[in-house]
Image (tube, rainbow, N blue to C red):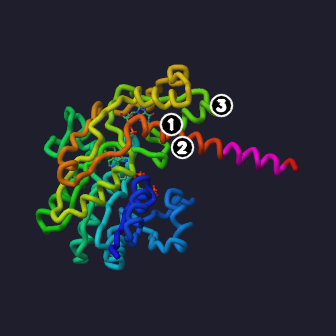
Amino acid sequence: MPRALITGCTGQDGSYLTELLLSKGYEVHGLKRRASLFNTDRVDHIYQDLHEKNLRFTLHYGELTDGSCMATLLYDIRPDEVYHLGAQSHVRVSFDVPEFTTDVVATGTLRILEAIRRTGVKTRFYQASSSEQFGSTPPPQSETTAFHPRSPYACAKVYAHNITVNYRESYGMHASCGVLFNHESPRRGETFVTRKITRAAAHVKLGLQKKLYLGNLDAKRDWGYAPDYVRAMWMMLQQDEPNDYVIGTGEAHSVRDFVEAAFARVNLDWRDYVEIDPRYFRPAEVDYLLADATKAKKDLGWEPMVTFSQLVNIMVDADLAEVELKMRGGAEAVRLVEE
Ligand code: NAP
Ligand code: GDD
């Protein structure tokens, strides 16, 4: 039974990757941060099935800012594959907490690579690189496109990417970087633009919200579906030789396109509800990201399965269902109190 360690296991991608690896018979170990409230919502459902389906899934407390903790976990778990997904992953927030972002994203990656090297654990390593690394370099972007990062987050990811390549070249590690373009899902954090929009469309439709405040509507992104993208991560680590791959759909849309499609899904005209709030503008913007994923398609046989309009519909429908469930729960609670 192969054994995997996932940092960022409680995040969007970590939760889908955990499901994928468990379905392939892996023993999965995940890192979770200590928080004052529960922060395992995205993986809690897996625990329900643990015994019934005989799944092997364990969460360990851990911190990417703590090198000794990373070394201990690696030594104790001795994983065959490490998927390093943990990060302060919000670009706008990285301008507010640049040092912390750099510590977690850049030095955090170095800490794990060093832990692998020093413990001598033989493992394959996946680095969650990002299309943000391309920044202002014109599209389409591929593995040979130059990086021009535009935020503390992107600068830290460039370091993490380069140090991963360096450890591969210096120490012969099986370490691969997946340069993933934006990927979304109903499990996307609520402050990323797609989820912010789909939640708002659901709330407006159900009469719980009047306006949606956004920043730059002209930015273009190559948006895909997160479960398709974690499949690519796994495929990369199954290759005999480590390598770096761009993953994206090859189709870009503006934030305006996304908001239009999301509100159309609930039969509303977005122009009646969206206002621009300069608070959401960034000190430096990334205008246009569009993937050329030819190499991944050819070498890995990877293809995205979900289109842009399917993605928007999946997310809006999930948010509608979630809000309706909460409303029903609230109404039921009121009824019980009144009885
Ligand atoms: P996400 O939902 O924000 O998840 C990030 C994960 O990292 C969470 O589990 C978070 O824990 C954990 N984390 C944050 N700081 C940590 C720390 N100091 N120590 C330990 N764990 C920490 O991100 P995602 O969308 O799944 O993305 C996964 C990875 O891919 C990230 O590295 C991201 O930068 C990268 N990436 C994402 C995209 C995308 O479009 N989604 C594209 C390219 C690259 P909590 O749950 O406790 O916060
Ligand atoms: N978050 C947010 N909120 N973004 C907004 C808003 C808003 O109200 N209004 C407009 N935008 C624009 C941003 O300026 C940006 O151009 C675009 O929407 C997408 O923003 P995000 O959804 O926050 O994602 P991102 O592209 O900055 O970063 C995501 O993708 C990267 C891969 O390219 C994150 O997942 C990163 O972790 C990931 O590396």
What kind of element bears circle 3?
A: loop
Query: What type is the residue that disc 1 sits on?
Result: Thr
Query: What type is the residue that disc 2 sits on?
Result: Ala
Asked whether 107 falls inside the magenta stretch, the response is: no
> In this figure, which residue is indicated by the disc labeled 2?
318
Crowd tier of the residue under label 3, counting other residues whose Cα lies within 10 Å: few below 14, some 14–19, many 20 or above: few
C-alpha distance separating marks 1 and 2: 9 Å
Q: Is residue 76 above or below residue 22?
A: below
Asked whether 332 falls inside the magenta stretch, the response is: yes
Q: Nearer the viewer, mark 2 or mark 3?
A: 2
* 220 with respect to 23 (left or right): left
What kind of element bears circle 1?
A: helix
At 22% from the left and 54% from the top, the residue drawn is 300
Q: Which residues are magenta?
A: 326-337
What kind of element bears circle 2?
A: helix
> In this figure, which residue is indicated by the disc labeled 3?
207
